[in-house]
Image (cartoon, rainbow, N blue to C red):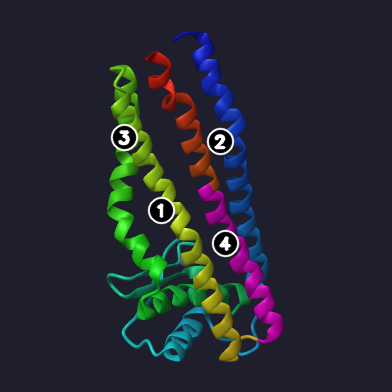
Amino acid sequence: MGFGYFYGIDMTYIVLVLPAVVFALIMQSRVASVFSKYSAYGISPGMTGAEVARRMLSAFGIYDVAIERVQGNLTDHFDPKKKVIRLSDSVYDSASVAAAGVAAHECGHAMQYQVGYGPIKLRNAIIPACRIGSSLSVPMILLGFLFSTQYLVNLGIVFFALATVFQLITLPVEFNASRRALVTLESSHILSEKENAAAKKVLSAAAMTYVAALAVSLMQLLRLILIFGGRGRRNN
Ligand SMILES: [Zn+2]
């Protein structure tokens, strides 16, 4: 294990992981700028994000989900255990296209639970395994590498792959929540056609951050396989 080995690590990082990380950073800054742009774009009925969420939930026939305020920026989420939609300050009180889009998206998640949408059930089912997987994978790979135990290395890589699968299942869940949101915003006349097109830009920018997170995870997985995966075969 000499200089060449470390050089190899650097090269796989630079060629595979770094471009994905840069892509993710660009997508994150893009969603922030698109959100702030459309936060200044008022909606005609003058409803705040919280009011949009309330109206969307009634449109879905959901009456047991509360709407609360949460601190932070772009921290909006749906908590399925407590049945609460939490909207950040810039969404809760804002009567803008951006706020309406984000609030409606979280209602889209509530609706996914209501109708028993398959991918969200699958995602929840694998969350515990993914949590364990992502916290144990790197220590396992390093221990396996240290003690030349390829079995442990491979198990670590499989554990890492679990976290990547989670990111993959997140994609249809997020895209579907946005689709439900946009359809309902338009059909319930909360937004005009033009406002809806603007809300779609906000939600598409947000969805790209999940695509980028998957890309980072996939590239990290590929890197682990390239560095550690073939070692056993070469040594035998
Ligand atoms: Zn979401």
Residue 182, percent from left and from top: 58, 79
Lower sequence index among marks 1 and 3: 3
- Region rendered in magenta: 192-214
Q: Residue 166: which disc?
A: 1
Q: Nearer the viewer, mark 2 or mark 1?
A: 1
Lower sequence index among marks 2 and 4: 2
Spatial CA distance of label 2 from label 4 is 21 Å
Q: Nearer the viewer, mark 1 or mark 3?
A: 3
Residue 149 visible here:
yes
Relative to 182, say whether 22 is above or below.
Answer: above
Lower sequence index among marks 2 and 3: 2
Q: Quadrant of the C terminus?
A: top left
Residue type beneath disc 2: Val
Q: Quadrant of residue 233?
A: top left
Residue type beneath disc 4: Ala
Determine if the C-beta at disc 4 is less than 8 A from ligand 1: yes
- Identify the main secondary structure in magenta: helix
**Mark 3–mark 4 CB contact (< 8 Å):** no
Residue identified by numbered label 3 = 155
Q: Residue 17: which disc?
A: 2
Spatial CA distance of label 2 from label 1 is 18 Å
Relative to 112, say whether 62 is above or below.
Answer: below
Residue at 51 percent across and 71 percent down: it is 176
Residue identified by numbered label 4 = 206
